[in-house]
Amino acid sequence: MIEFKDVSLVYPNGTEGLKNINVTINDGEFVVIVGLSGAGKSTFIRSVNRLVTPTSGSLLIDNEDILKYRGSDLRKLRTKIGMIFQSYNLVNRSNVLKNVIAGRLGHTGTLRSILNLYKKEDIGLAYESLQRVNIDDKIHSRADELSGGQQQRVSIARVLTQKPNYILADEPVASLDPPTSHQVMTYLKKINKEDNITTIVNLHFIDMAMEYADRIIGMRAGEVVFDGPVSEVSEKT
Ligand code: ADP
Ligand code: ADP
C-alpha cells in the first residue's frame, strides 16, 4: 500500500511540483495518472521511489515513511519497485539478455555482470520474463537494433526479473505509435493482474487511461483534481 499524506514538494527554484497530496493506492491496483505536461505526474511517481524527495508530509509504503529513508533503506526500497521510462533506458550496446538480467543483478559492479558469467537460474528467469512479453526471440540482439515497442517490452521484462511489488511507469508509451502503445499497455495490465503487482502509469491521453485503468487520478498544477474509478470520469467530463 502507498499512502501520500499531505505531501508537498517544492523544487529548489521554488516550483511547486506537488501540493498537499492525499492519496492511498491499494495493493494490486492499476492506477493511471493523467494530466498535461507540467501537472506533476513525474514528480508524483518519482517521489515513490525517492528519485525526488518531497519537502513535507509523509509517504508511507507498506506502513513505513520512506521520506525518512537514507542509504541502505533506499536501496532496499528500490529493489521492490520496478521503473519503466518513456525512453526505455536500456544499455544500447548490450544485448537483450544482459539488459534483462540487469533488473536482477544491476548493470555494473558485480564481477558476474562484467564477465557475462550468469547463473543458469538468472538466464532462465530472463528468458521466462522475455517470453511473457513475447520477445524471447530477440534475446541475443543488441538493444539498439530493436524498435521502440520491442525495447519497451524488454524494459518490462527487465522489471519482471526484479520480481517487484510495485511497477511505476512514467509515460511508457509517449514515444510509441497507437497500435504499439496499446500492445505495451496490454502487457502492463496483464502483468498487474496475473502477478498482483500494484502499478502506477503516467499518461497524457485520457482515452488510453480510460481503456486500461482501474482508477484514474487527474493532476493539474501539482494538485490532484480527480480521483476515482473510470466510470466516474465520463460523468464529470
Ligand atoms: P509532468 O510529469 O506532469 O509533466 P513534472 O512532475 O515533470 O510534470 O513537473 C511538475 C512541475 O515541476 C513542472 O512545473 C516542472 O517544470 C517542474 N519541475 C520538474 N522537475 C523540476 C526540477 N528538477 N526543478 C524545478 N522544477 C521542476
Ligand atoms: P517530463 O517528461 O517528466 O515532463 P521534462 O522533459 O519536463 O520531464 O524534464 C526532464 C528533466 O528536467 C527532469 O529530470 C526534470 O526533473 C527536469 N526539469 C523539468 N522541469 C524543470 C525545471 N523547470 N527546472 C529544472 N529542471 C526541470
Image (cartoon, helix red, strand yellow):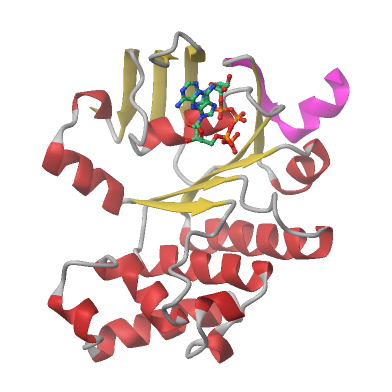
Question: Residue 107, relative to residue 218: is it above or below?
Answer: below
Foreground of the two, 61 or 47? 47
Provide residue 180's location: percent of width, then percent of height: 76, 65
Q: Quadrant of residue 87?
A: bottom right
For image coordinates 53% across by 51% down, the residue present is 85
For the C terminus, the quadrant is top right
70 above or below 159?
Answer: above
Which residue is nearer to you in this view: 44 or 63? Answer: 44
Q: Residue at x 44, y 51 (%)?
A: 83
The residue segment tinted magenta is 223-237
- Looking at the picture, tell me which residue is in the foreground, 229 or 136: 136
Task: Say whether residue 106 is left or right of residue 54.
Answer: left
Up the image or down, 165 lies above or below 16; here it is: below
Q: Nearer the viewer, residue 213 or 158?
A: 158
- Is residue 190 toward the left or the right of residue 98 in the image? right
Is there any visible trace of residue 3 in the rendered image? yes
Residue 217 x %, y %: 64, 27
> Residue 225 is drawn in which quadrant?
top right
- The residue at the point 72 percent across, 65 percent down is 183
Residue 1 in sight from this viewpoint = no
x, y percentage for residue 13?
Answer: 44, 12
Residue in the picture at 38% in, 14% down: 12
Residue 15 on the magenta segment: no
Give the quadrant of the N terminus: top left
Report the image quarter containing ligand 1: top right
Is 236 part of what is drawn in magenta? yes
Q: Is residue 75 above or below residue 177?
A: above
